[in-house]
Image (spheres, rainbow, N blue to C red):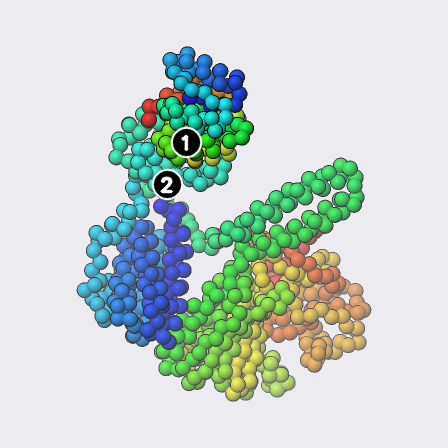
């Protein structure tokens, strides 16, 4: 599942994953929506943007983890937001990717998290 | 982790526990059924045991363990006997010696004979080696050390390490890491991480797991550094404990200084004189504040001495069968660490003197400390028999300190100061304690070494008071700047009694010696130029004088000019200049001028020698 308020980012990520034979089963552009979608689809992996309008990625992640402690969530953030990433990892994110990202890096992180 | 790093911490903390034990024992001496006191003693012994075992000091551990057992019995009995208190005080002494051994990297002295001297429970002394090992194992030497290094291209080292720590935590508990989890969350961003992981997995498997992270440049499993560690030289006085509150103050002040810098730069760029003026004013305030806080770091309260002094009084009154109360006032007064350390022995000696020579059967010794502007006064007083001036007169004549004529004219107060002359001791019998060849001269020298002045006052039948006038700090002090023989010199304010100017016709002569009237006494008038072996200067009118004390006597020191008082940062002179007598350091004034600190005492020693 991909959560990002920017359509461009969602499209790029979808392309990265699909080209490596992953299946994207859901997308969300808001935190609230992400929580609802997670409940419906219970995906193996979530890529969650940290900075989104209304409910941010960290809060959405916390809400998901509260109900599904085993949720595998990778947060996604722009360069220079180390503090947000720290907060997210401390709150339960399994790993993180930093925008702008390269394909190989994104896939490495995702495969690593799924493998664990 | 290098256990050696903890050694100093261990020494400091163990010393604190010992100090607490002595204080508690002395309190229990007057209230032997104080449960809280016995409990606290037990905890101190227990803490020392745990720390010593961790640090693998078997003798210290054995003794602390033995004390712990003994105190456990006392807890059950609900009381502690006077006999036991004495025995425990001896144990505290022995532990201090053991810490000394550890500090100086000697092998620990044996505690066998002491433990078997315990009248109560010899069989308890067999502390099993297994238990020591068990205590030690729970803290050190466990787990696998892993060293990780990130690629230089990784821009998010902190979060990356946090993820890695989380990953490692799935393999087994992470015992510790450098930087720690908290450091990382606070924004530490080094590219190196050292982890101690407790895991049953073989190294290879941990390595495989970590290899999935292409961000890692190096994964190594270093050996325990313990065997390889070099025997470094350590000294206790090099470390200071600083409260985090104080550190926060420093950070805040630094922040304000940075803001101030930009303010000043801006004002300068815009030639805005008013802002510049305000900025400089603020800078002055910040620097003053910073100075105050920096001084705080080195400050310790006299409290740290109180335990040792109570102990001295306790031991002496036991051994001499006297009933002596010790009162301490103003123990919260703070002084530079180096001064407090330098005062320890002199104060103990003064207290011993008071017990040996002052108090006959029962009495009170009071130690008072108080602030007088930027000086600290410490007074040791007893209500004993006082000092008989006649005896001093006789003694002074005997050892040729003065001639019969002088002896009669000297005022009692000045006579008393003669006690501080080398070789002076009127004690009729040499006691075990104060007769060890350390007289008041040594005490006075020690006080002067930390920049203080000592004076004695005594009334026969009423008691003796010894007063110390001390600077707050050794590094930053208030000085009097004077000029002599074309140069500037500084004198610590603590050494200056007063500055005066007199007209030449107030000078009298007594034989070859010029004298002046100061208050109601006649003081010798000495020329600083002459002391410094400089050519004679022109005659001055009025004559500027510094009233100061040398070798226990007030003198009037003639200088060329009195410049004024200043707060200066005194720096020690590097060798070989530290060998120059009469000069105890140097400082740089605001205008860049170097000024030396005048140490009259050593100058006079040279003159006499």
Q: Residues within 10 Å of mark 1 (few under 14, many from 20)?
A: many
Q: Which residue is depicted at the point 47% across and 55% down?
A: B237
Q: Secondary structure at mark 2?
A: strand
Contact between labelled residues 2 and 1, with CB atoms less than 8 Å apart: no
Which residue is at the front of the view, A18 or B286?
A18
Q: Is residue B3 left or right of residue B130?
A: right
Q: Which residue is depicted at the point 41% across and 12% down?
A: A19
Give x and y (percent) for residue B373.
64, 66
Which residue is at the front of the view, B214 or B217?
B214
B209 vs B585: above or below:
above
Q: Which residue is depicted at the point 42% across and 50% down?
A: B234
Image quadrant where one finds the C terminus of chain B = bottom right
Identify residue for label 1: A64
B460 vs B449: above or below:
below
Image quadrant where one finds the N terminus of chain B = top left
Which residue is at the front of the view, B103 or B505?
B103
Q: Secondary structure at mark 1?
A: helix
Quadrant of the rendered image containing residue A44:
top left
Identify residue for label 2: B176
Quadrant of the rendered image containing residue B492:
bottom right
């Amino acid at each position: 599942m991909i959560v990002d308020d920017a359509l461009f980012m969602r499209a790029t990520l979808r392309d990265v994953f699909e080209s490596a034979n992953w299946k994207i089963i859901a997308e969300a552009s808001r935190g609230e929506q992400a929580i609802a979608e997670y409940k419906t689809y219970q995906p193996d992996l979530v890529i969650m943007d940290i900075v989104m309008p209304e409910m941010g990625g960290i809060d959405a992640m916390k809400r998901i983890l509260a109900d599904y402690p085993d949720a595998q969530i990778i947060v996604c953030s722009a360069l220079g937001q180390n503090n947000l990433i720290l907060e997210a990892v401390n709150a339960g994110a399994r790993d993180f990717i930093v925008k702008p990202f390269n394909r190989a890096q994104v896939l490495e992180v995702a495969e690593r998290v799924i493998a664990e | 982790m290098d256990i050696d790093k903890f050694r100093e911490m261990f020494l400091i903390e163990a010393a604190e526990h010992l100090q607490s034990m002595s204080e508690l024992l002395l309190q229990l001496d007057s209230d032997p059924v104080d449960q809280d006191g016995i409990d606290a003693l037990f905890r101190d012994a227990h803490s020392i045991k745990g720390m010593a075992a961790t640090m693998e000091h078997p003798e210290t551990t054995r003794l602390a363990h033995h004390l712990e057992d003994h105190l456990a019995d006392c807890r059950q009995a609900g009381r502690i006997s006077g006999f036991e208190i004495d025995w425990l005080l001896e144990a505290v002494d022995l532990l201090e010696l053991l810490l000394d051994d550890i500090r100086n990297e000697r092998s620990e002295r044996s505690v066998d004979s002491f433990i078997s001297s315990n009248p109560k429970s010899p069989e308890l002394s067999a502390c099993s080696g297994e238990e020591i090992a068990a205590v030690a194992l729970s803290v050190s030497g466990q787990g696998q050390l892993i060293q990780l290094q990130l690629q230089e291209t990784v821009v998010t080292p902190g979060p990356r390490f946090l993820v890695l720590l989380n990953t490692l935590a799935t393999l087994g508990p992470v015992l510790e890491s450098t930087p720690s989890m908290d450091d990382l969350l606070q924004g530490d961003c080094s590219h190196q991480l050292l982890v101690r992981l407790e895991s049953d997995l073989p190294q290879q498997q941990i390595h495989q797991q970590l290899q999935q992270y292409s961000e890692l440049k190096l994964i190594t499993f270093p050996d325990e550094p313990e065997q390889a560690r070099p025997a470094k030289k350590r000294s206790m006085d090099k470390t200071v404990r600083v409260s985090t509150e104080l550190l926060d103050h420093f950070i805040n002040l630094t922040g304000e200084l940075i803001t101030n810098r930009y303010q000043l730069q801006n004002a300068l760029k815009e030639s805005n004189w008013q802002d510049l003026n305000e900025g400089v004013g603020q800078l002055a305030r910040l620097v003053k504040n910073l100075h105050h806080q920096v001084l705080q770091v080195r400050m310790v309260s006299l409290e740290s001495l109180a335990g040792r002094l109570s102990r001295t009084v306790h031991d002496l009154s036991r051994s001499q069968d006297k009933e002596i109360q010790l009162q301490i006032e103003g123990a919260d007064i703070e002084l530079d660490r180096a001064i407090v350390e330098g005062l320890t022995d002199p104060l103990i000696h003064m207290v011993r003197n008071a017990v040996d020579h002052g108090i006959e059967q029962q009495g009170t010794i009071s130690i008072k400390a108080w602030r007088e502007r930027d000086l600290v006064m410490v007074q040791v007083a007893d209500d004993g028999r006082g000092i008989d001036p006649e005896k001093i007169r006789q003694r002074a004549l005997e050892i040729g300190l003065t001639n019969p004529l002088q002896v009669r004219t000297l005022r009692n107060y000045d006579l008393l100061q003669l006690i501080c002359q080398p070789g002076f001791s009127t004690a009729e019998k040499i006691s075990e304690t104060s007769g060890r060849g350390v007289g008041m001269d040594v005490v006075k020298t020690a006080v002067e070494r930390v920049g203080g002045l000592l004076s004695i006052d005594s009334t026969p039948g009423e008691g003796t008071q010894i007063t110390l006038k001390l600077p707050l700090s050794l590094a930053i002090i208030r000085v009097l700047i004077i000029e002599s023989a074309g140069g500037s010199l500084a004198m610590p304010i603590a050494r200056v009694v007063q500055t005066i100017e007199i007209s030449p016709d107030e000078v009298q002569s007594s034989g070859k010696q010029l004298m002046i009237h100061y208050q109601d006494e006649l003081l010798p008038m000495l020329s600083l130029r002459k002391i410094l072996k400089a050519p004679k200067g022109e005659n001055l009118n009025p004559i500027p004088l510094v009233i100061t004390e040398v070798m226990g006597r007030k003198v009037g020191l003639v200088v060329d000019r009195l410049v004024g008082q200043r707060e200066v940062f005194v720096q020690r002179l590097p060798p070989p200049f530290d060998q120059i007598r009469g000069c105890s350091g140097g400082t740089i004034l605001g205008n860049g001028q170097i000024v030396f600190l005048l140490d009259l005492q050593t100058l006079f020693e040279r003159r006499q020698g």
